[in-house]
Amino acid sequence: MRTLAMLAILVVAAVEAAAPAPEEKLKKWQDDKGVWHYGDNQTVAPNSSTNKAADAYRRGDYPAAFEEYLSWAKRGDPQAQTMVGTMYLRGQGAAQSHANAIEWFKQAAKQGNPNAQYNLAVLYIQNPQMAPDEREPRLWLRRAGEGGHVEAQVLLANKHANGEGTPRDDQQAFNWYQKAAAQGNAGAQFQLGNFYASGRSVSPNDKEAVQWYQKAAAQGHAGAQLALGAMYAGGRGIAASDQDAVQWYRKAAEQGNAEAQYNLGVRYLNGRGLAPDAQAAFTWFRKAAEQGLGLAQLNLGRLYGEGKGTARNDTEAVKWYRQAASQNLPLAQYYLGRMYAEGNGLPRDGAEALQWFRRAADQNLPLAQLELANGYLSGRGMELDQSRGLQLMTQAATGGSPEAQLQLAERYLAGNGVPLDNKIGFDWLRKAAEQNHTPAQYLLGVLYARGELIGRDDGQAAEWYRKAAEQGHIASQVRLGGMYANGLGVSRDDRQALQWFQEAAKQGDAQAQANVGALYATGQGAPRDDAQALSWYRKAADQGLAVAQLNQGLFYADGRGALPRDDAQAVAWYRKAATQNLPLAQLMLGLAYATGRGVARDDRQAVNWFEQAAKNGLPLAQYALGMLHSDGRGIPRDWIKAHVWLNLAASGGYVGAAQPLEYAASQLNEADMERARTLAREWRTAHASAAQTN
């Protein structure tokens, strides 16, 4: 019964409001916008600043406002009718009633009031059961749009753009956005910019897109500010400017736009357009992540995992990786897999790690494909399956992973699990190198320098070493320094050699430190500076580099680099290097024992160290050993052995061995001479074979 009563009331109200009372003589007049009004004169129109209804409404006296508006509405004023409908809709001054709102909106709409037409359309859209038919909402929305109602124009555009309630029609969407944009609607201006930027229904025009983005952004539209920042970042339609990109990203970010917050975080992390600030990056990533943006969650997890911009917290890293992974972001799935695999932030769980790697790999993430490939190839944590492993590695390489390309190249070059194929291997290696993968660039340089698999090309070797060296690759810096020092593939330039050796030396490379010391010691690439030379030798020697230990010993022996002469210290450093099988250090230690300099004279020890150096192919040590055999010092005299070692020294280029060799020969009969020559030949053959193997 209550429902029937309510319907009766609504019907009565609608009937009563259908037209002004017949006895009222109202003047009909049209305002400057073409809207018809009813009243005694223009000064008492409902929306006039002196109108009692408007004043009451502004005061919040809704009953009084409703009563006044209703009186005008009953006389047929469309604006008053629209306000009555609005107040019924909101429950202001009268019980809320969608049905009454619709009736009053309809009366105003039929008189051409765009606001009423729009409100009626929206009510029908939101309450389709109240619409007479499915065409009614579209009819009133279009009439409102044609009447210049900007929100109606935007809604019409959105529906055409998205195919909501009407077939998708980009041209119609563009036309309606254009009408609304011309009236200054920021949302429409933004969408118009999107249409021009993407070439949707119009020819792509970045400059036009920028102009519309600027109009909307100036009104504070966050989406347009984000888009304008992106146009500045990419130099699309406007000169590229990282600073301007940051400025617009910040405006949008401060309004809470998650994508802008993420972009601003990336800028702070990379230092583009502003000073790098990991803490600020963390702050902006967190804001965006808390709004559910997957990429921000991923990056927030990485910052927690690396302790960058915040204290390291593996538990938090796992939390954010998991949230991003649940949005199906493959990189987040991969990192979550790594956390499980390594037991960081949660208990180690190989099966769970494998599950996440597979999810990421199924989305063609090369990192995950390579992870699985190496697991299959090694049988580590999963079944051994060479075929599946190589298939996944090839997929990762084809997908652009430089590490996968390098690993695949190494397999083809070595014939490891695949047929030996230098061409395929070289092609994969070059692909990785061209992606600035430093290990691949270094290996490519090595292959060119050695002339292995490809023709030797020192110029190409130097070029690939340079690419890797400029990215801080230590071995490449050392190799490039060597190319400059020896004039291989580049013009000899000791200063350049010193520069590249220093780059590697600063990163702690012992060989580079020794090379820097050698250049300072000889005055190559820089003025001679024994103190600097000694400093670098010491750094390398302390790391156990034999050649640096030898040179430090020589500095002690000569009292160079502000060191007092100290033969005992010299011998100590010679010994460190000699025990690492450095021939020259073995020779120097032998000489120290032979002369009693820095150590008690001991001919047997001299023979021992000379012999080790001689067997390592050092001509001067071979000469010294030959002389000890001739003299019978520290060892019984043996003219055959003396001849062998002196012969090897002479053939090795030590001219001082010629005369003692001749004398040793005079002490041998023909059979002994042949024996000595045979032993020398055998030694050369064995030594050459060993050198080739190494």
Image (cartoon, rainbow, N blue to C red):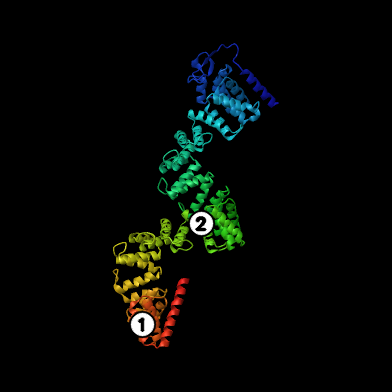
Q: Is residue 490 visible?
A: yes
Residue 427 is tagged as: 2
Q: Secondary structure at mark 1?
A: helix
Q: Quadrant of residue 492?
A: bottom left
- Tell which of 276 and 502 is nearer to you: 502
Which one is closest to the eye, mark 1 or mark 2? 1
Q: Amino acid at mark 2?
A: Asp
Q: Mark on residue 163? A: none
Circles 1 and 2: CB distance less than 8 Å?
A: no
Q: How many marks?
A: 2
In the image: residue 536, left or right of residue 52: left
Viewer-proximal residue among 535 and 579: 579
Nearer the N terminus, badge 1 or badge 2? 2
Q: Position of residue 476 (x, y in %)?
A: 42, 60
Binning the other alpha carbons within 10 Å of mark 1 as few (below 14), some (14 to 19) or many (20 upward) gives many
**x then y, percent, for residue 583:** 39, 74
Residue sitting at x 38%, y 62%: 488
Task: Give percent across and percent down for residue 226.
Answer: 47, 40
Q: Residue at x 50, y 43 (%)?
A: 259
Kind of residue indicated by mark 1? Leu
Taking depth in this image into account, of 402 and 281 the one nearest to the observer is 402
Residue appearing at x 42%, y 84% in the figure: 676
- Element type at mark 2: helix
Circle 2 crowding by C-alpha within 10 Å: few under 14, some 14–19, many from 20: some
**Cα–Cα gap, marks 1 and 2:** 55 Å
Q: Is residue 505 visible?
A: no
Up/down of 485 relative to 146, above or below: below
Q: Whole-percent x and y of residue 550?
A: 36, 72
Please name the residue that numbered disc 1 is placed on: 661
